Image (cartoon, rainbow, N blue to C red):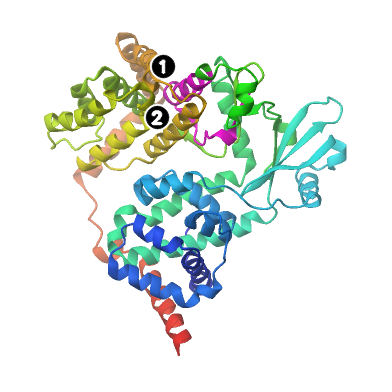
Amino acid sequence: METIRGPHNILRLIRTGATFERTGAMRVVLDALEVPPLLRLVLRGLAWPFGWLGYRGDPAMPPVTRALTALGPAYVKFGQILSTRPDVVGPDLAAQLQVLQDRLPPFSQAAARAEVARELGEEVDTLFSTFSPPVAAASIAQVHRAVLRGSGEEVAVKILRPGIERAFRRDIDAFYFAAAMIEFLAPFSRRLRPRDVVAHFDSVVAAELDLRLEAASAAEFAASTRDDPGFRVPPVLWPLSARRVMTLGWAEGINAGDLAAIEAAGFDRAALAERIMQSFLRHALRDGFFHGDMHQGNLKIAGDGAIIAYDFGIMGRIDAYTRRAYAEILIGFIRRDYRRVAEVHFEAGYVPADRSIEDFAIALRAVGEPIFDMDASRISMGRLLAHLFEVTEQFGMRTRTELILLQRTMVVVEGVARSIDPHMNIWSAARPVVETYVTETIGPRAALADLGRGLRVLMRFGPLLPDLAEAALIRARNPEPAPQPRERLPRALWAAGGAALALLGVWIGTLL
């Protein structure tokens, strides 16, 4: 929930600004957001006197990742979430944030054991015959390798950092405060919807701070991919999972980024790359539920060549209609049918109806044709989607968060696949999956299935339809008066204005 607490947040934001200025990240962020020169001067002037309060961070890291890592877990996670929003931070900064690493020290073995005992109600030595030191430490949790007592099964035990909920709540409160200030002091920024971005981050973190929800995502993903050849998800051990502890089967294999080990194991790298790309497309199109963070660190190659995915904190979901439209757009580009691609955008309401479909089709041809003239090893579906979103934005398409995540994940998956097989032909890998989906979901049989689903919905809600129709007619005849401008003005805006004046007062006070 959004809160505004002036004094606490002013001090927190002073330290944040000082850290960004001290690490050189301030200039990078202001450039990425295209902040006007006068406001840029004001912001840097406010941060400069407090530079000594800022954290130094690791000088070996790029400025923005250095600053976020120094500021702590909430800032690291916020940077990771922003990497999925190039529409907000720009493509260059988003690319930098994609490689943001959780370079945070693990918490102690004693603390980990205490958390397991508190959450599961039994001591670690009662549940496990071995319980290793942390094998991975991230911004929110860390993972231990263990062996179940009795069965001897190897498992991965994920444990939230002690006190992480309180720390995140404090920082998210400051993020809301900063977003309100930004919107008040820089009206041009409202097109980026800063408070909506923070609210999205808040919802993502809330889900990640309850490992039961991540376990549920893992279980759903395992169920939807159960019959996929060459793709596996570790099983959830529900009796050993709770709000702050989650236990999965151990994923034994070679890290997808360890190319030397993959080569030494004798795997067919072209087949692996194709499997990774096709698995992602199959999950996104067929299921509408896909892994939203499929980088090398979250993928392993099993001994039989199967892809093993883990870490299900960020998952993407797309509704059936959007999946169908997305598939038609992809297949239209593959077939170079730009008129049909344009029609799909208009039919889906992505582009306003008052725009010219002919002009839009020409713009789409300008996106697609240069890519088809490239060598197969240079064709990039991620680049195609990036160019496509640029064109649709010019034609008035509103940002759709789920498609931004899809685009970002596509870029990451494509990068993983190309790292394994640099000569991979993306179109050849994608075409059978997309064409199969289009064949199964578009046509007479698909139309009959849609009609059947619609009739079942009407049958379930049949008794309510007369009342709903009557209520709609009454509202149509007696529309509610439009709210007055004063009623629409967010209260947070007034709080942000007062906070801005307070911050300016603090700054002036340091100069006196």
- For label 1, the residue is 433
Q: How many marks?
A: 2
Q: Quadrant of residue 345?
A: top left
Q: Position of residue 392 (x, y in %)?
A: 24, 37
Q: Which mark is residue 319?
A: 2
Task: Identify the mark nearer the N-term, 2 or 1.
Answer: 2
| Gap between marks 2 and 1 measured at Cα | 18 Å
The magenta segment is: 272-301
Q: Position of residue 498 (x, y in %)?
A: 39, 75
What type is the residue that disc 1 sits on?
Val
Q: Are the residues at dot 2 and dot 1 in contact (C-beta closer than 8 Å)? A: no
Nearer the observer: mark 2 or 1; the answer is 1
SS class, disc 2: loop
Q: Quadrant of residue 403?
A: top left
What type is the residue that disc 2 sits on?
Asp
* Disc 2 packing (10 Å; few <14; some 14–19; many ≥20): few
For the residue pair 368 and 171, the one nearer the viewer reads as 368
Q: Could you tell whether 351 is left or right of 176 in the image?
A: left
- Observer able to see residue 105: yes
Residue at the extreme top of the image, as rendered = 445
